[in-house]
Amino acid sequence: MDSGTRFTLAMSAPPDDVDTVHALLGTVWSSSPAVSATDRVCFETALIELAGNVIQHADAGTGVSCTLTVEVFADRIEARLSDTGEPGQFHLVPGGMPDELAESGRGIPLIEALVDELHYDRSGSLNLWRISRRLGNA
């Protein structure tokens, strides 16, 4: 695999939250001026949604430890998030947004709409997430 510029963050929620992820992305964007505003907004929204879901839904009451790596390549930007939370009880199946009156279920479809790839796996006691967006993707 080609090599990109890598940024890694270890966090524990609580006390860390999505503001911690925003701060990391501020560093990523200041170091990667070639990434367009559209790519930044789409990727950041998807990653914040993913991190927020992990922080909110994967915590069984004892907190969640996460490692987040964001990597900028010449043609794409990727994030890998591993967490110690509960296993996900969902399936990554493209299906669009839920009914407009639904109170939940928009996070995964939103992420899928904003990035080119979304992968989830469970390995031992870790949830493993990866999102990727091709740069210049309209």
Image (cartoon, rainbow, N blue to C red):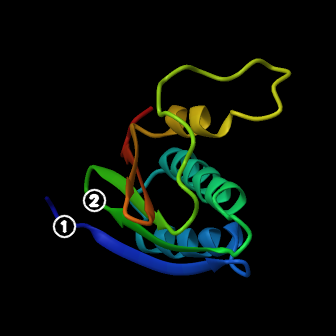
Quadrant location, the C terminus: top left
Quadrant location, the N terminus: bottom left
Q: Which residue is drawn at 65% across and 40% down?
A: 107
* Nearer-the-camera pick, 106 or 124: 124
* Nearer-the-camera pick, 78 or 55: 55
* Nearer-the-camera pick, 137 or 54: 54
The amino acid sitting under disc 1 is Ser
Q: Is residue 117 left or right of residue 14?
A: left
Residue under label 2, please give it.
73
Disc 2 residue crowd, few under 14, some 14–19, many 20+, Cα 10 Å: some
Whole-percent x and y of residue 125? 44, 66
Whole-percent x and y of residue 19? 70, 71
Q: In which quarter of the image is residue 122?
A: bottom left
Q: Residue furthest left?
A: 1
Q: Residue at x 15, y 61 (%)?
A: 2
The span from disc 2 to disc 1 (Cα, nearest Å) is: 7 Å
The amino acid sitting under disc 2 is Phe
Compare marks 2 and 1 and give the one earlier in the sequence: 1
Q: Is residue 65 left or right of residue 79?
A: right
| Callout 2 secondary element | loop
Residue under label 1, please give it.
3
Q: Residue at x 60, y 59 (%)?
A: 51
Q: Is residue 137 left or right of residue 5?
A: right
Whole-percent x and y of residue 65? 56, 76
Residues at marks 2 and 1 touching, judged by CB atoms closer than 8 Å: yes
| Callout 1 secondary element | loop
Name the disc covering residue 30, or none.
none
